[in-house]
Image (cartoon, coloured by chain):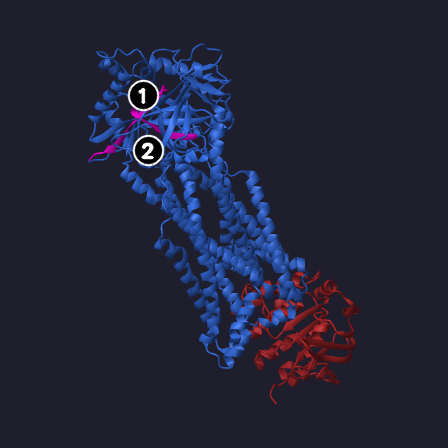
Chain colours: A blue, B red
Amino acid sequence: MMVFRHVLRTFASKKATLLLLGIVVMLSSFVFTILYLGASSVETSSEVFFEDYIQEEFVIETTPLITEIERMALAPDCPVVSQTVFQLYHEDKDCFYELLDFRLSLLEDLEDYTLEPRLYKDGEIGGFEKSHRVRVLKDARIMNLTYLDSGALPETENEIAILSHYADHNALSIGDTLDVDGSDYIITGFVLFPDYNLPVFDHPFIFTTSTQTLALMSDAGFDAYERRAGFYYSGLFGVARFTPEDFLEEHADIAPFIHHMSLTENNMRSGAIYAEIEGSYAAAVSISVLIAFIGIVIVGLMMKKTVEQTQRPLGILKALGLKNREMMMPYLVFITVFSFVFLLLGYGIGFYSAPWMRDLYLAFYLLPRGPIPISAFSFIVAFIVPFFILVAMSLVIVFRLLSRDSLTLMNPRIELPRIVRFRSLKRLSKKFPFFLRFQFAFLSRHMLKAFIYALGVFFAVYVSFLSLGMEGVFDDTVHAYYESTEIVSVGYGPTGENNGHTRVIELQGNLGGEGAFVVGLPDGQTIHPLFDEAGESLLGDLEDGIVLSRSFALISGFSVGDNLALRIGGVEETVLVTGIADIHPGEHVFTSREYIGETFFEDPGFHNAVYARVALSEDDFDEVFVIENLLSQVEEINEVMMQMFYVMIGAGLLIGAIIIYLLTVLTVEDHFYNIALFKMIGYHDKEIHKMLLGGYSKLNVLIFLLVIPFSLMTFDLMTTFFAQEYNFVMPLGLDWPHVFLIAILYGMIYMLASRHAKKKINKVSLQAALQIYQV
Amino acid sequence: MIRLKNVSKVYQTGLVKTDALKNIDLKIEEGNFVVILGPSGSGKSTMLNMMGALDFPSEGTVEVFGEKLSDYPEKKLVQFRRSHVGFVFQQYNLLQTLTAAENVEIGAHVSKNPYAVSEALEMVGLEDHADKYPYELSGGEQQRVSIARAVVKRPKALFCDEPTGSLDETVAKKVLSVLKKLNEKMDTTVIVITHNPSIAKIADRVIRLNSGVVAEDKKNARPANPEDISFGP
């Protein structure tokens, strides 16, 4: 009992340190639990959903232009005069479906697979202050089947089923009326589609569920809904799978209308969820392992120090006949209770917060909401493993220290450091001024402690940079692009009178095997400038070739000087990449409108859209696209994303701050003998702190400065990796204000921690300190 | 001169008061080699700490080399220790991660006019061990490094608290020889506290403390050479 009281009193004097340490231990369990359970809830429900509702395995996109062979093939029944399939849909729906079937039959002969056209129409929802948009999908029969969340499927022409996400945001219920492009539709139910679990970045239909929804109408309702129809072919592989590259290479000549093929698993529209879930698992494990590692090391250090500080009385008790087991027990009971409480707390908070994490995923991925699974694995990893590691490590430390004989315990000796000798470093350091030399000596000869400290600081700063680096990435990609132009609205379809607007070409095409959004800009236009990274205009380069957006360059890996095949509507031309524009609108390729018109349409004046500096009227075009609305959607997405990022930023800063605080306090306490010795020799407090803490201050600065290039490098690698693997451009950035913010914040924490530690040191009498440690 | 006037020191632990020193009056001339003898708890270390500006008296005044330490705030005491005194302890108190030369350099840095580190190591006969770490040196060698660290700043006085307490007789004599040499050649006042009466033979003056009071204060007419003394009974 006496030993218990003694140990409790010792730990009671370390309340603040223990609490902070407990938070680190708790966070390691919490981070893993929330990320793992959140992701696995989405994964479980997604897998069932995708399988039961037959998610497409790939998508084939075709040109919106009607090719020559199609005109010839359709000629007997449908003498086609339209240039695009959209125009054809307006003019003659039967011919449009005949064209779709013609393409389908040609495609079906190419490989052993199953295809189904996926038709959609984009429109406006009325009755709201802001612009609300809808993408109506035609019900599929073979794959991408409609999932009915609640209610019933629409059967009549004036019925509609929408997303429950959108309904929740806008207080809509089943039975309510929805104004779609001026016509009233009755909401019959809430639906989801397996191919559209992530329409967020399917530019230009950028998706926020507060102002946009996917919808299903009856087949008759879909045909009666007078909007421009878009389509692509969804597919399921037969026996053999093939790559998009092989597919295009083999069949582009036979079916010249093929633009692009992409696999669902690495397609942002349908497959990003897999990457997200994998990424979440990886993040859960790596972040929590790193936090746990640091937590375990600090717990170990603290246990060692606590036992060392109390070994004199323990030596006396041992001399009086107490057994090792009796002396170890209170420490083990303490660490068991400590680890149990904080790990369980972390697991519990993680478990109860997992639905929040799941719902954050579901704000983007339009998937059914599944329950949070009870996972033995997550409990083992988040609680049992770290619990046993903490207890076992403490047991080893305490056993090692207390197994010494009673005399050694009563007269503790300083443990001799294992000095790693770096002769060249030592020689180099001889040229340093006095304080710098000794700061260097204290760090380099306590290599392990310095390494753990440096690792902790590195992790803390990097996590903070990464969290802050994500701020506004989604906003930046589209926002920055449109801010660089003077476009207020875009009109598609018949361009009518010129009215001073800029006539452009916007077309889906294929560049070097990659699906591309080709933009033809007329000579002399000023509404859409193009600048490279250095701020130099690239408009002049359009005369000699094509300019890629940075996001497309990242996704494709193409660079300036590459000669690539540009395919539009069955015609293929080799073009030279002359520049990379510093914008991230999507997979954009810019070139001269006159060149596109002449080369691909034999008409230098060809255009299919206008860019305007004013808001265009919906009456004059098939579709009008208002930039302001788009940007407000992007901002909304950003706001939702920022919720997640703020949690990451907060957790990153909290962990970083605690690590720096604890490591600084422990490190200064560690030098307490040295401090007393310096005092005795006649060093002033300032000199002592300079000598012992100065090294850590410089190490902090050094690590901080190292993290900057490391972050820039890894952020670039991450951006390129996501772009090339998942067609997902997330330009992580390191803003200088963030760097200064973190520097000031951590500088303050470091000062606070060292001040606290210095105070503790100053309370110790120098004679007492010198007598405690004997060599 | 070191002067203690009516010095008393009372330690209070909880409700218990302990008189470590009682009304001590003492003068020590500069350049003397003084041994303070006494059993454990006689107040030797307390007296040394006060003369060395490590501790304050509860009553009375302590004046060392013309500076009234008993009136000084902590900052001035640090300045005094920095300028005038060196310490040698039984436990050597070396920094384990610094080499012998670096330990000595730590002592040199606080002085305006220090000896060269190599010179200080030469004085204690360790010039060939400059780059060794403490754990690579014997106990006697470590104690000599500690002496070199204390003398490198050219202190006026060297306060040694049981400097040979952890050493065997042969090594202890070597250490005492070094102290004696410093006293004679550099004119440094050396005050050694010990419970070993044999060491008293090498001193100019021997002060015996008992229960916090000066029990005996005598001068040696012919101090012995450290090599000639014997620690035996």
Can you say whether A424 is above or below A131 in the image?
Answer: below
Instruction: Indicate left or right for B159 with A58 as reference.
Output: right
Can you say whether A238 is above or below A66 in the image?
Answer: below
| Distance of label 2 from label 1 (alpha carbons) | 20 Å
Farthest-out residue, front: A175
- Nearer the viewer's eye, disc 2 or disc 1? 2
Q: Which residues are magenta?
A: A212-238
- Marking on residue A152: 2
Q: Of the residues shown, which amino acid type is indicated by label 2? A: Ala
Can the viewer see residue B148 in this picture? yes
Instruction: Indicate left or right for A90 with A464 as reference.
Output: left
Location of residue A593 by image quarter: top left
Instruction: Indicate left or right for A37 with A701 as reference.
Output: left
The image shows residue A222 at horizontal and vertical percentages of 33, 23
Q: Nearer the viewer, residue A730 or A117?
A: A117
Can you say whether A621 is above or below A153 in the image?
Answer: above
Q: Secondary structure at mark 2?
A: loop
Provide the chain ID for the residue under circle 2.
Answer: A
The image shows residue A485 at horizontal and vertical percentages of 50, 23
- Does the magenta portion include A222? yes
Q: Name the residue at 53% across, 38% down.
A: A735
- Marking on residue A223: 1
Q: Of the residues shown, which amino acid type is indicated by label 1? A: Asp
The image shows residue A685 at horizontal and vertical percentages of 67, 60
- Marking on residue A522: none
Provide the chain ID for the residue under circle 1.
Answer: A
Q: Quadrant of the C terminus of chain A?
A: bottom right
Q: Earlier in the sequence, mark 2 or mark 1?
A: 2
Farthest-out residue, bottom: B233
Instruction: Indicate left or right for B132 with A625 as reference.
Output: right
The lab-note entry on whether marks 2 and 1 share a chain reads yes
Q: Secondary structure at mark 1?
A: helix
